[in-house]
Amino acid sequence: MDRLILRVAGDHPEVERKARLGLLQGWASVGMNSGIFLLKCVLGLVLGSIALVADSVDSLFDVLGSVIVVFSFYWFRRPRDREHPFGHGRVDLVAGLILAVLLIVVGVELARNCVGRILHPPEYIAPWWMIAAVAFSIPIKEGLAIFSRKIATATGLSSMEASYWYLRFDAITSATVTAGLLLSRWGWVAVDGWIGLFIAGVIAWTGILLVVTRISPLLGEAPARDEVDAVEQVAGRQAGVRGVHDVILHKYGDVKLVSFHIEVDAHRSAMDVHDLAERVEAAVEKATGCKAIVHVDPVDREHPAYARARQSLVAMASRDRRLVGFHDLRVSGREEAYVLSVDLVASVDIPESAHEDIARLAEQSLKSDLPGVEKVRITVEAAYTGEAAEKQERVPGPE
């Protein structure tokens, strides 16, 4: 199995390698699940077993799901175009979302049929050859599940990981159906409907889980703490960078874009700052594999009022639990009459409607604490890094 994966993957570029492995798993799943569906459906209809028919419909949706996976990977490997400059990587998530919705619909419909079978159970005894035929599908599905897990490990594709869990559930439900058929030989006929209801619940629940896992990245998830740390550490190590903030990560399948701000000495020339920004971008791209975009914020820490202004902001952020920090502190003008501007970072849980009140109270606090401040400009922004921002120190501004 490992040799087959390596041979199919070859030394192709990353996107093509993932597409080839995804297609390998998809077509293998289409072929095997088609055979399993036909076998179970025919036997279930002949015997009148709702559990077996339910399990065959589950196999049918395995086939449909695999077809969707195959289609998505043909789309996935398409080159970038004018309408999709970041590629087609998110089609993997869209395909999974479509499959998840279909699973929920099928699960609900099967549950309705199974309730009727529980209330009015038929009389039948499953023959041994039928039980053996159903049991035969269990190792096939388990083998497909293991195969999907290996491809998921080799590619990191979420669709392959989802396929693994789906096939693993499928093997479990087939084992449950086998148990129900065995029990029917001892007169427990009604258990067939209960087992079918259990299978319907597994199908619907799996669909709900897949919907949740697909919608979140499509909506745009906050980066993980380690992703933010990687960017901040690499950028912060570059000579001339005095602070890093506002790290925003965008993911489009294999294409990742990261944008962030760096603070630099306000007295540096525009040419020096431009060269520094390019060095930072190159370093971050090499370390993270993301396309980096840097915004430069000039900061004058040598201003006589800078230290006092920063100390006041630290105290204010510590008092107001709605704040997680600040950045872009600028002080300009004479010490006895200067202008102060700063960006305050509010917790992700704070609604934007409260930002105006935060800015108003912050302005009053700064004017009260800082003699000589003539004007205060405050911008309040949400913590773009979401949960990651909440795990920072209360005041992450640079010293």
Image (cartoon, rainbow, N blue to C red):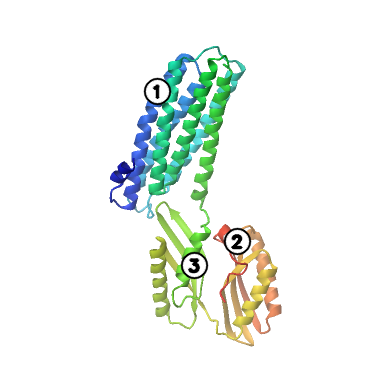
Q: Position of residue 132 (x, y in %)?
A: 43, 20
Amino acid type of the residue that numbered disc 1 sits on in the rendered structure: Leu
Judged left or right of residue 4, residue 327 is right
- Please indicate, yes or no, whether residue 152 appears anywhere in the rendered image: yes
For label 2, the residue is: 390
Task: Name the disc covering residue 232, or none.
Answer: 3
Residue depicted at x 44% and y 18%? 130
Task: Name the disc covering residue 38, or none.
Answer: 1
Label 1: element kind: helix
Amino acid type of the residue that numbered disc 3 sits on in the rendered structure: Glu
Q: Position of residue 215 (x, y in %)?
A: 51, 46
Judged left or right of residue 287, residue 49 is right
Foreground pick, 132 / 48: 132
Q: Position of residue 145 (x, y in %)?
A: 42, 37
The single residue placed furthest to the top in the displayed view is 123
Foreground pick, 139 / 17: 139
Q: Residues within 10 Å of mark 3 (few under 14, many from 20)?
A: many
* Residue 24 drawn above or below residue 392: above
Residue depicted at x 39% and y 71%? 278
What distance separates the C-alpha of mark 3 from that of mark 2?
16 Å
Identify the mark nearer the N-term, 2 or 1.
1
Label 2: element kind: helix
What distance separates the C-alpha of mark 3 from that of mark 1?
55 Å
* Residue 387 drawn above or below residue 278: above
Q: Position of residue 162 (x, y in %)?
A: 46, 41
Residue depicted at x 44% and y 29%? 138
Judged left or right of residue 112, residue 92 is left
Q: Residues within 10 Å of mark 2 (few under 14, many from 20)?
A: some
Foreground pick, 76 / 117: 117
Q: Image quadrant of residue 136?
A: top left
